[in-house]
Amino acid sequence: MTSRSKINSFSQNNKFFQNKLDIAWLHLTNKCNLNCSWCYVYNKIGHKTAVDISQPLYNLSLQLLKDLHIKELVFIGGEPTLHPNFPQFIYAAKQKGFKSYVVTNGVKLSNLDYLKSLMESGLDFINMSFVAHKAATYNKITRTNNFFDKAVQAVKNMAHLNIPFSLNIIIDQKDKKGCFSSTVSAGTTQLILETKRTNTVHRHRAVAGYQKDKNKYVELLSFVSELGAKEVNLISCEPPSTHSTIDTYNQTKNSLWNNQNKKQVNSALPDPQETAAIMEALYLWNRKNPKLDIHYQAAIPACLFRRDILKDIIEKEKYHPNYIAHLGSGFVINPHGDIHPSSHFVNVKLFNIIKKKRNLTLLTKDEFLKKWNSGKTLNFRKALWRYPSKYCENCPYWEKYCVGGNPFLSFVYDLPRFIQKGYTKNIIKAEIR
Ligand code: SF4
């Protein structure tokens, strides 16, 4: 069997095509109190007016999610705390037995009473984006003037109330306006980790650059630690899909890969080896400074990590590759009732759950599953689920810990070349327990 036919046969038979759904993101609103320059909720999708999910659509969506046996909800936006019904939404989710999380810029959490009201409504966890540790940088990134202190206060408030929370830190380029986050609330998730950009895939040169800047990273992490943060989530920067009508992976590729987007993406996106090197540098710092619990949400080829480090963070359950879209284990519902394959693919509309607009009626569970497991939704997943490199075929990390990184990376970088280097250097002798 040739390599290509092996890949095709693998793709067709993969057990994950029938994977169980277990998570849903509810995109509650396009509104945001910040105005981050890179935020595609406004800039890329082209929303002229803000849209909130309606209470009836939310209520019916909850019932549909319950019928689908989904366990976890993640509230996203825009900025989800700007939805006027947000506390009621949390309460309704709790009543139905969901675990709920929010991804937020934290501005509204500077109000202690509001924060308490969210927790009393039943919110289980907060993922707050911390854009920068200096007011001037924060203002520049968010194109606002008065919110840095609120972000700081929000962290203090959560620590004071002993609320379970994590700060999202996205790895991107220095002096850029920001990378494209992997979530719909991209404009809310950024902490600039100043990095040296190189075009090399040679680890040691990259690491040398980062270690030179190590004090800057330490400064950032120390700052959030002193505010009371206990957990930090390092997230690899990923290019977005930028077209609203794309159906397939290839169309996604075409829509992303035009000159304007290429320029934007390249200007902010560290190459995958750089991302791994930054995370490694912070891992090594963290070993000597264990006050912060650092997690690694790295949608990059896992082989780019030094294998002892990768092994350790996997064993400690701190390695979180993002490939829910590949697995088909979750989806996003937006305020219009559109379904997206995951928060990575925010502009890929798969189908709509509204069956009748008058007397609002949604798809039944069976109707939903039929659409989810057939047609263009299934084709989309199949298109994603392929070996990005022949090296992945023999890799012990494949499927369990890695599917080759975010596929959009391959539109910007020569991903197979990175994987070959990483595999031969770091994985070939690896032992997975
Ligand atoms: S060889 Fe492929 S599957 Fe293995 S770690 Fe690298 S990218 Fe992931």
Image (cartoon, rainbow, N blue to C red):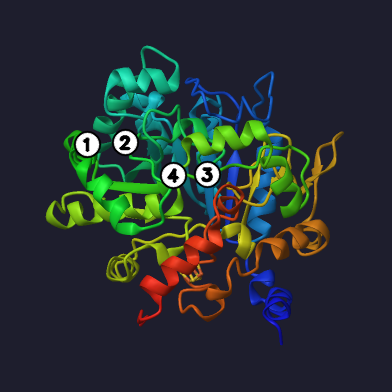
Query: Of circles 3 and 4, which is in front?
Result: 4
Q: CA distance from mark 1 to mark 4?
A: 17 Å
Q: Are marks 2 and 1 in contact (CB under 8 Å)?
A: yes
Q: Label 3: which residue?
A: 182
Q: Could you tell whether 30 is left or right of 115 in the image? A: right
The residue at the point 35 percent across, 48 percent down is 233
Q: Label 2: which residue?
A: 194
Q: Residues within 10 Å of mark 1 (few under 14, many from 20)?
A: some
Earlier in the chain: of badge 1 and badge 4, it is 1
Q: Residues within 10 Å of mark 3 (few under 14, many from 20)?
A: many
Earlier in the chain: of badge 2 and badge 3, it is 3
Q: Is mark 2 within 8 Å of ligand 1?
A: no
Q: CA distance from mark 1 to mark 3?
A: 24 Å
x, y percentage for residue 306?
Answer: 31, 66
Earlier in the chain: of badge 2 and badge 4, it is 2
The amino acid at mark 4 is: Pro
Earlier in the chain: of badge 3 and badge 4, it is 3
The amino acid at mark 3 is: Ser
Q: Could you tell whether 184 is left or right of 113 in the image? A: right
In the image, 265 versus 190, the foreground residue is 265
In the image, 373 versus 383, the foreground residue is 383
Q: Label 4: which residue?
A: 270
> Is the residue 375 above or below the residue 184 in the image?
below
Q: CA distance from mark 2 to mark 3?
A: 19 Å
Q: Could you tell whether 218 is left or right of 358 in the image? A: left
x, y percentage for residue 173?
Answer: 40, 37
